[in-house]
Structures are given as C-alpha cells and as structure tokens.
Amino acid sequence: MKLLYHIGRYFILMGILLRRPEKASMYRRKIVVEMDLLGLESLGIVAIISVFMGAVVTIQTAFNTDHPLLPIYAVGFATRQAIILEFSPTIISLILAGKVGSRIASEIGTMRVTEQIDALEIMGVNAAGYLILPKIIASMIINPALVVISIFLGIFGGWMVSAATGVVSLHNYIYSILFEFSSYDVMYAIIKTVVFAFIIASVSGYFGFYTRGSALEVGNASTKAVVFSSIYIILFNLILTQLLLI
C-alpha cells in the first residue's frame, strides 16, 4: 500500500508541474541555468569514463574473439554496438542518476526543511513547477547531448587503445566501426536517454520535494532518489529495448 501511495503522489506531483507557469521567462532562464549545473558540469566525468570504457571494451572484445573463423570487423563492430546500444545511454544515465539525482534531491530537500518552499507557496508561486520542471526539461535536453559525446569518446577510446597496443589494426578497427552502421541505433540511444533523463529529474525532485524533518532526512531523500532512479532506469531499459528493437 505504501508503494501505491508514493506512485499516486508522484503522478499528482507531475500533474502540478504541468500547470501554466506564472512567468514563462523565469522558467526559460532557469532551464538554461539548470542545463549548466546538471549537464555541463557532468561532462568531465562522462568523458573520462567513456574513453576508458571504450578502451576496455575493445581490449576485452579483441581477446575474446581471437579466432580465425571470425571476420576482421568483429572487434570494432562489437565495440560500436555495445557502446551505442547499451553503455552510453544506460551506464552513463546510471552515473548521472548518482551525481545529478542526489544533487536535485538534496537541493530541493534542503529548501523544504528550511521552509523556503513554504515561502514560495505562500507567495502564490507553483513551487513544484518552478523548482522541478526546469530541471526535468534541462535534463531531457542536455543528457542526450552528453550521451552522443559519450558514444564518440567511447569509440575514440577504442581507437586509442588499438593504436597504442595493437590489439587490432587501425585499418580493421576503422573499417569495422563503419561496417553496416545504422543511424537508428543512435536514435534508439537518444530516445532511451530522454526517458532516463525524465526519470532521474522527476524521481529525484519528488523525493526532495516531499522531504520532512531535518538534515538527516535530506540525506535519506538523496539516497532514495539515487536508488529508485537507478531501479527505474534498469526497468525502463528492459521495456524500451523490447519496444524499440523488436
């Protein structure tokens, strides 16, 4: 019953977010600010993880496909598909759930326990819409851009390790990266990322907005935001994979 209670309250909150804003220009400015805070500040960790994971996937694929009957394009092809279809959209979203989700929940939760949200509501401001909706929109805009960058850097990391170690020749790697490339794979990754971005921002905003108590509860809300965002990302990853790749 408690789960149904939270699900119901979550959807009620989403309905409140969609109310007409008091001043649209304020929302537009806040969206730009949130894109910087939630997206661009995560670029560094996304870049580092993508390069090294692309390199690791290439090395592991090369050593596990070392067979004369396998085609020369197996290594790069497998690396490309793994990065585009799964690693960049899903793993990067899980990382952002930890970094961005905890930030959203703690920021809004702190405003709740210090009664700043109560002050906004007394002034007639749609506090939920003003605090959460710009974060959702900003995440849904900037996260796909981060994933596209991650895809490029992951493939580049595979190229770097190929050049440095010779696990696969550069000619074969480049050929296999381009072999039967489908733009739909990238679109699939972007669609998943948009859904995951909505989950991260909305679930984290929900736990932050309904925080009650003191600083201890703010920490608990941040933890719940990360845990539940990650669970829902994994769940919807399965659902979207079934829907988009059948």
Image (cartoon, rainbow, N blue to C red):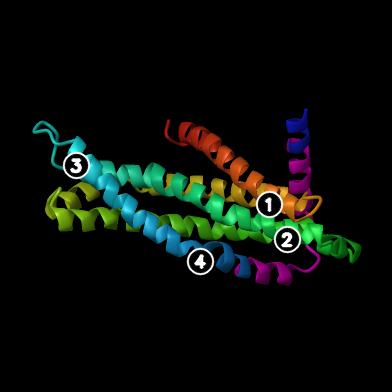
List the single residue furthest toward the front. Answer: 216
Mark 2 vs mark 3, CA separation in Å: 47 Å
- Specify whether residue 10 is painted magenta: yes
Q: What span is colored magenta in the figure?
A: 7-32
The spot of residue 206 in percent (x, y) is 72, 48
Which amino acid, by three-letter code, is at mark 4? Answer: Leu
Residue beneath label 1, please?
Answer: 219
Q: Residue at x 18, y 50 (%)?
A: 173
Residue beneath label 2, please?
Answer: 131
The spot of residue 246 in percent (x, y) is 43, 30
From the viewer's perspective, is 172 left or right of 94?
A: left
Where disc 1 sits, the SS reads: helix
Which amino acid, by three-letter code, is at mark 1? Answer: Gly
The spot of residue 98 in percent (x, y) is 55, 51
Q: Tell me the tag on residue 86.
A: none
Q: Which is more foreground, mark 2 or mark 3?
A: 3
Mark 3 vs mark 4, CA separation in Å: 33 Å
Residue beneath label 3, please?
Answer: 62
Give the dominant element type of the magenta stretch: helix, strand or loop: helix
For label 4, count other residues whose C-alpha is less than 10 Å away and answer few (under 14), some (14-19) or many (20+). Answer: some
- Specify whether residue 117 is painted magenta: no
Residue beneath label 4, please?
Answer: 40
Among the two numbered marks 1 and 3 on one chain, the one whose residue lies closer to the N terminus: 3
